[in-house]
Amino acid sequence: MIEDFEHCYRALESRDPRFDGWFVVAVTSTGVYCRPSCPAATPKRANVRFYPTAAAAGAAGFRPCLRCRPSAAPGSPEWDTRADLAGRAMRLIADGVVDREGVAGLARRVAYSPRHLHRQLVAELGAGPRALARTQRAGTARLLIETTAMPFTEVAFAAGFSTLRQFNATVRDVFGRSPTELRRRGRVRAEPATPGLISVWLPYRKPFHWGGLIDFLDARAIPGVEEVTAAGYRRTLLLPRGRGVIELRFDGRELRGIFRLTDLRDLPVAVERSRRLFDLDSDPVAIDSLLSADGLLGPLVREAPGRRVPGAADGTELALRAVLGQQVSVARARALARSIVFELGEPLPEPDGELTHLFPTAAALAGAPPIALPMPARRQRTLRALARRVAAGELCLDPSADRSDARQKLLAIPGVGDWTASYIAMRALRDPDVFLVDDLGVRRALQGLSARLADVPRLTERWRPWRSYATQHLWSSLRATRRRAARRDRVAVPGGVA
């Protein structure tokens, strides 16, 4: 259980939604556990227990509240920030590794024995890897049961269960209701069923600056692989069991993920990678609170509350794209990536609108002929060296990566410097405290704010542990400046293009 009882109880009394996902509240008089923001009457102190995870509350004999749906809360921001064994393991469990490779596979990924891993997770999170994975499967199942009209057989496989019988038994055991009873209580929307298409809500913490994410991704979208439209963001993705197309739409209130998958069992992985790409588990109130108090960054933060750090749906892809972007403009890097995608990427059997290809695998790039890589010879060697190390398993850039170890291995590759390694750490490894001090855009933004570059090391210490978010605010200030300049030019020149 969580030891800081008073702090948690005050959050419970205030029904503060910022704490949803950080911990769960178990009530001994009812036998259920809830989010801190649950609208039910506040229980007596003597009847309350706090647990770090839903799995821990379930292991203690509590069932999830049917009213506040704790399994549908955003994930804890802790798993993005923590670089220790528990943090790495939780990111892998969310990515479905236990379902695909078992506890032994999870232990292998983090380089510990299964026994030590189990002992460490129980000590810190109140539950072992099997229980944590089971709770995740149950939460996914409930979301699909209550918010879609999918047949239960498809729900079972999409949530990661191997049999319908296992699905029924787990749902009844965890929620105290059968799948049929849960569906009656849900809010299924009458939407036309499309084979292979699954639509689910993606929870997040407010505020949420959707526009900043879309602007960033739009500028870097690779034709054939990614697309930004008026409706939202779409991209192709290679998943553990097949291919997929993910789409995220935001209407100002709800964020919706739409997934077209060749194998329904890839749904939890597709959802988790979408969450990482859009930084949906971050705590914007905590981040904005610190950065908005800064005299230099404060106006930028207050103008765009809830700004996220765009992550990566695939860490290896992001790293390879970072090398492509070395010493060239964003537009040139995008053009290079497009050329390589159409030359080396796997075509989709059936194009989905403008989406036609998967991004090339590390193995494909490692063995690519020089003519397929239209860039200077030195950068070709760097790209191939990075791809070879990833393909051979010598360099890990997935959620299990040890950030310090990955950074050292990246810097050991000829042609990978501090900027590239830091950019990969910020986006692919989800390190929230990266500051790209030598980035030209960051330096221009600081100068635009009348900051002396000699003062930058001292300034950035005030922004810890959220310097990755500070970097995003600085980059965005440049985009805003360019937009204002473009508007002035259109007004000043008669007949200018609108």
Image (cartoon, helix red, strand yellow):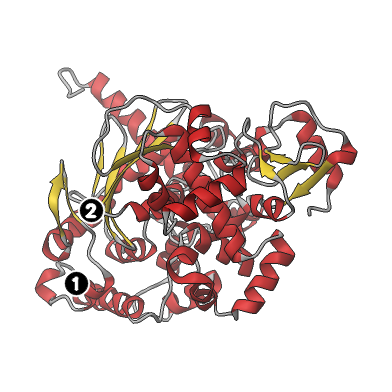
Q: Looking at this rendering, what residue extends furthest in the right direction?
A: 46
Name the mark on residue 334.
Answer: 2
**Residue 244 visible somewhere in the drawing:** yes
Q: Position of residue 30 (x, y in %)?
A: 77, 36
Q: Quadrant of residue 21?
A: top right
**The C terminus lies in which quarter of the figure?**
top left
Judging depth in this view, the residue of 256 and 372 nearest the camera is 256
Q: Establish if 68 lies above or below 101.
A: above
Q: Which residue is mark 1?
A: 376
Q: Earlier in the sequence, mark 2 or mark 1?
A: 2
Q: Secondary structure at mark 1?
A: loop
Picture residue at 60% right of the left edge, 81% below the top = 113
For the N terminus, which image quadrant? bottom right
Toward which corner of the image does residue 367 lie, by quadrant?
bottom left
Is 4 above or below relative to 255?
A: below
Tag count in the figure?
Answer: 2
The residue sitting at the left extreme is 371
The residue at the far front in this view is 165
Kind of residue at badge 1: Pro
Name the one closer to the observer, 43 or 275.
43
Residue type highlighted by circle 2: Arg
Nearest to the observer: residue 471 or residue 90: 90
* Left or right placement of residue 116 versus residue 469 in this view: right
Q: Is residue 257 left or right of residue 78?
A: left
Within 10 Å of the Cα at label 2, are there few (<14), some (14-19), or many (20+) other Cα atoms? many
Residue 185 tag number: none
Q: Position of residue 297 (x, y in %)?
A: 58, 40
| Crowd rating for badge 1 (residues with CA inside 10 Å; few <14, some 14–19, many 20+) | few
- Please tell me which residue is depicted at 60% across the width and 77% down the height of the picture: 114
490 sits left or right of 154 in the view = left
